[in-house]
Image (cartoon, grey):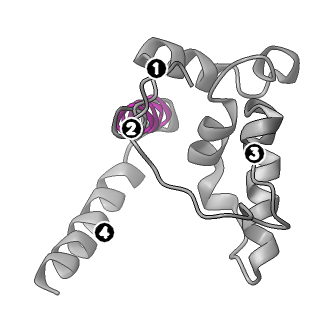
Amino acid sequence: MQLYEKVLMNSGEIQRYISQLPPFAVEPYFQKLIVNEAQSNNEIEGIRSTKEELTNVLEHIRESKTASKKRFIGMMKLYKYIDQLEPFTKVEDFRKLYDDLVADEIPKDKQPDGQYFRAKSVSVYRNQGNY
């Protein structure tokens, strides 16, 4: 509980400092945080990516022709626009988010095969492939 309280207090302090900065200074900072977070998550999941690759995707996220052909576009969209997501109120909301963000990046045979999720149980192992 004390750690949670400390996080909340630190978050408030960080927000106060950020609000004093001009927007041109804030945007690069948040983009760097997004790239670092995505890189860390990919590393945990065993997905090969570089910070350069993730930065490139983030910078071109609004260019739909270019972005739709890049890996990680869905993940970077989620990080960039997470504050604009509506709260989930039903199970279908999870599947809609998945479909909107990453379904185009995942081969059909690797996508969930149930109505909302996978029909059978799955296990997560360290990934040794390029995917």
Q: Which residue is mark 3?
A: 111
* Contact between labelled residues 2 and 1, with CB atoms less than 8 Å apart: no
Residue 26, image x and y in percent? Answer: 44, 38
Q: Secondary structure at mark 4?
A: helix
Q: Which residue is mark 1?
A: 49
Q: Quadrant of the N terminus?
A: bottom left
Task: State left or right for residue 106 relative to residue 38.
Answer: right
Residue 108, image x and y in percent? Answer: 82, 36
Q: Amino acid at mark 2?
A: Leu
| The residue stretch that appears in magenta | 27-40
Disc 4 from disc 3: Cα separation: 39 Å
First along the sequence among labels 3 and 1: 1
Nearer the observer, disc 3 or disc 1?
Answer: 3
First along the sequence among labels 1 and 4: 4
Please name whichever residue, 27 or 38, is drawn nearer the observer in this view of the structure. Answer: 38
Task: State left or right for residue 114 relative to residue 53.
Answer: right
Toward which corner of the image does residue 114 lie, by quadrant? bottom right
Q: Which residue is mark 4?
A: 12
Disc 4 from disc 2: Cα separation: 17 Å
Q: Which residue is mark 2?
A: 33
Q: Amino acid at mark 1?
A: Ser
Residue found 60% across the figure and 64% down from its top: 121
Disc 3 from disc 2: Cα separation: 29 Å
